[in-house]
Amino acid sequence: MTDTPPDHLSIDPSSPHFDQPTLERGIGIRFKGVERNDVEEYCISEGWIRVALGKKMDRHGRPLTIKLNGPVEAYFQRAAESDSAEGEEA
């Protein structure tokens, strides 16, 4: 695994941008300098995040989302497993 998060990531399993191992590692998002914990999907290069719109649901039972534009910073919340395994051996 690399130390840079993917450019585009989604938490929806039906999305082509879904990546379970990356999500298990933990992704933190800073949007416009503010830490966000409610991000459903993001794209760093295009500068947007998608967040749930309250408790509203679409006809398939998925949350309705709204796209917000602005600077996006993504980072891993935990180190890669290979890095932590090397630290335990030493």
Image (spheres, rainbow, N blue to C red):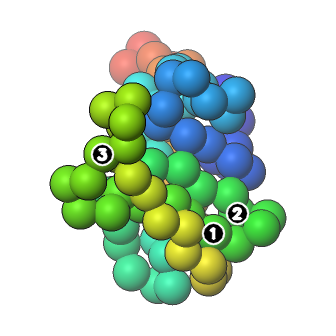
* Residue 78 visible in this rendered orientation of the protein: no
Instruction: Give me the C-alpha separation between circle 2 and circle 3.
Output: 26 Å
Measuring from the top left, give residue 52's x and y in whole percent: 35, 57
The vertical placement of 7 against 79, above or below, is below
The vertical placement of 3 against 50, above or below, is above
Q: Residue at x 59, y 56 (%)?
A: 42
Measuring from the top left, give residue 41's x and y in whole percent: 54, 50
State which quarter of the image contains the N terminus.
Answer: top right
Closer to the eye: label 2 or 1: 1
- As shown in the figure, which amino acid type bears the numbered disc 2? Ile
Measuring from the top left, give residue 6's x and y in whole percent: 69, 44
Number of other residues with Cα within 10 Å of mark 1, as a class: few under 14, some 14 to 19, many 20 or more: some
| Callout 2: SS | loop
On residue 57, which mark appears? 3
Closer to the eye: label 1 or 3: 3
Instruction: Give me the C-alpha separation between circle 2 and circle 1.
Output: 7 Å
The vertical placement of 56 against 45, above or below, is above
Pick the front one: 63 or 44 = 63
Instruction: Give me the C-alpha separation between circle 1 and circle 3.
Output: 21 Å
- Quadrant in which residue 16 is drawn: top right
Residue highlighted by disc 1: 48
Closer to the eye: label 2 or 3: 3
Residue highlighted by disc 2: 44
The answer to whether residue 38 is left or right of residue 26 is left
| Callout 1: SS | strand
